[in-house]
Amino acid sequence: MQKLNAVVKKYGLTHTQTMETEHGYIYLVQSKGVKSGFDVFMKKVSKDREATIGGVKIHFRSAERYPNDNAFGVWAWHYMTFDQALAKLESLEALAELKSSGGK
């Protein structure tokens, strides 16, 4: 499985990994070097798959995914401060631990 890059550039923004836990990430979001907040999200992995494109069979390896716009509010969130982002990540970790121990 391919891990997420430490720096992700999309939509003209630079996202720099600030923290990784067992179940999630915090990325610093910057526009032209100016902080615009922090993205917090659960780890999601795309599956290994094959597709035929233009008659050529292509294999796509499983990889961790950076959230798209539709993920925000579902499995990803944006906060203005690191403390807010950290609190959310800690709550995601607690929820994941609860689920893995058989709780709901």
Image (spheres, rainbow, N blue to C red):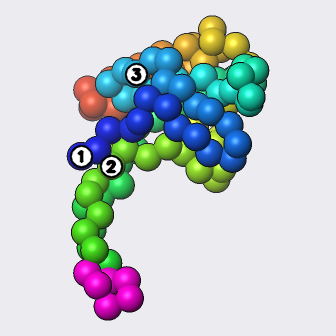
Task: Measure the alpha-carbon separation of dots 1 and 3.
Answer: 16 Å
| Mark 3 element type | strand
Q: Are discs 2 and 1 less than 8 Å apart at CB? A: yes
Mark 3, residue position? 20
Observer-nearest residue: 58 or 86?
Answer: 58
- Tag 1: amino acid: Met
Is disc 1 in contact with disc 3, using a CB cutoff of under 8 Å? no
Identify which residue is drawn at 29% across, 84% down: 56
Which image quarter: residue 78?
top right
Q: Is residue 44 left or right of residue 102?
A: right
Amino acid beneath label 2: Ala
* Residue 94 in view of the camera: yes
Tell me if residue 66 comes above or below residue 28 in the rendering: below
Label 1 Cα neighbours within 10 Å, binned few <14 / some 14-19 / many ≥20 = few
Mostly what secondary structure, the magenta segment? Answer: strand
Q: Secondary structure at mark 1?
A: loop
The structure residue drawn at horizontal position 27% and vertical position 30%, both measured from the top left corner, is: 100
Q: Residue furthest top?
A: 83
Residue numbers of the magenta segment:
52-57
Q: For residue 63, which numbered disc appears in the image? A: 2
Q: Quadrant of residue 87?
A: top right
In the rendered image, the residue lying farthest to the front is 32
The percent coordinates of residue 46 (x first, y second) are 35, 55
Q: Which residue occupies the foreground of this view, 47 or 6?
A: 6
Considering only order in the chain, which callout, 1 or 2, is on the residue closer to the N terminus? Answer: 1
Residue plotted at (60% across, 22% down): 28
Task: Work out whether 71 lies above or below 30.
Answer: below
Towards the viewer: 27 or 6: 6
Residue at the disc numbered 1: 1
Horizontal placement of 48 versus 15: left or right? left
